[in-house]
Image (tube, rainbow, N blue to C red):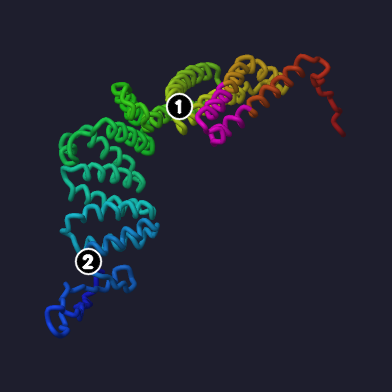
Amino acid sequence: MDAAPHVFRSLLCLTLAPCLLHCGGARQQVVQLDPIEFKVDRSGGGHHVYVRDFATLTDEAMARYHAGEWAEAVRLFDLLVREYPAEPGIAAVQHNAGLALLRLGRPADAAQRFADVQRRSKGTRDARDALFLYAEAIDAAGQPQAAADTLRGALDDAAVQADIGGPLGVLDQLEAAARMGLALRRALDPTHADEAFKRVERIYNDHRDVQVVAESEWVARSLYERGEIYRELFASIHFKLPVERMKRDLEDKANLFLKAENAYFHCVRLHHRTWSLAAGFEIGHLYSQLVDDIDHAEAPPELDALTVEVYRDELWNHTERLAKRGIAIHRQNVALAGRLGEKDSDWAARSEEQIGRLEKMIEVATQRRARLNDPKALPLPAETTPTAK
């Protein structure tokens, strides 16, 4: 419900009684001030008396916002929009309402505010900012494909660019392309997501001599996400019989491994505190996953337990060096974390865990090989036990 019709007006009069030096007696002077209008807002279900003044209401709304009282801030921002729809500063009010709604976990409602800001601010940088926030909001509301389409429009559509103050600058291009790729990943479209992240790399390569471009988080994030796309495809392939299929699986898995490793390595070289350490961990983890997948490859069902042990040991001839390589990479990641001042980071801790795990795998494989090479340790064939009558 809109603000209730109950209106209270108060005319404040200030009575002054100065002693006028040029006359013999005191004289009262009445100064009339502008009226202050009070209203009652019942829109939130309660009764809120407020002063109907744009500046006063705006200050109160912003005070609530900065205090983290998001719901009350939204109520006041919405009240301002209802009471002063034509006020020049109303677009900023709606912008802040959208931010508060994002804080409240109401992205669909936030998106409506940002869309209105974009409409009111057509042709300005404010409209551009609103478009980015609108895309973020609808993505969070479960519409990642729509978010990607919105960002693609900002990058490639001349009509959209005219509405947001012209073509995007380099930093905005990096952000828009990276956000588009992230949205497409959430939309389960890895092919187009990869294209979006490649676009970030092209922009970076064209402007890498500009410091703010070289240091952009979106570049490191995009390289990491490209690695993630290939790693997830790599992890989806499991070695299964028959042998002909295993050979194809190994070839496909190896190609995806190399693509993921390449993207991660490019990310590591940027030395970003978060994404480079994440990428360093994932390179080592690629080796761990490959070792696990080979170690758990299907064994021919006709093999007995001892022959399966021999089969696993033969596989280990090919995977031991992978395990050792994984350990070396994780140790390098721990060292990088130290150089970046992040030795206590979660990624460094996870690398330490993987080092311990891979070392344990090497120990277990070594013990298995020792048993297989010691005839005394091999199990004797089971004796035939007469069947009870």
Does residue 181 appear left or right of residue 305 in this picture? Answer: left
Disc 1 is placed on an element classified as: loop
Question: Viewer-proximal residue, 181 or 279?
Answer: 279
The magenta segment: 329-355
Give the quarter of the image for residue 53. Answer: bottom left
Q: Is residue 159 above or below residue 237?
A: below
Image quarter (top left, top right, bottom left or bottom right) of the C terminus: top right
Image quarter (top left, top right, bottom left or bottom right) of the N terminus: bottom left
Query: Which residue shows up at 36% across the image and 61% down it?
Result: 71
The extreme bottom residue here reads 25
Question: Viewer-proximal residue, 79 or 209?
Answer: 209
| Badge 2 density bin: few <14, some 14–19, many ≥20, Cα 10 Å | some
Does residue 106 appear left or right of residue 345 in this picture? Answer: left
Q: Is residue 123 above or below residue 252?
A: below
Disc 2 is placed on an element classified as: loop
Q: Is residue 194 above or below residue 144?
A: above
Give the quarter of the image for residue 383. Answer: top right
Query: Which residue shows up at 16% across the image and 42% down it?
Result: 123
Residue tagged by mark 2? 53
Amino acid beneath label 1: His
Residue tagged by mark 1? 271
| Badge 1 density bin: few <14, some 14–19, many ≥20, Cα 10 Å | some
Q: Is residue 330 visible?
A: yes
Q: Earlier in the sequence, mark 2 or mark 1?
A: 2
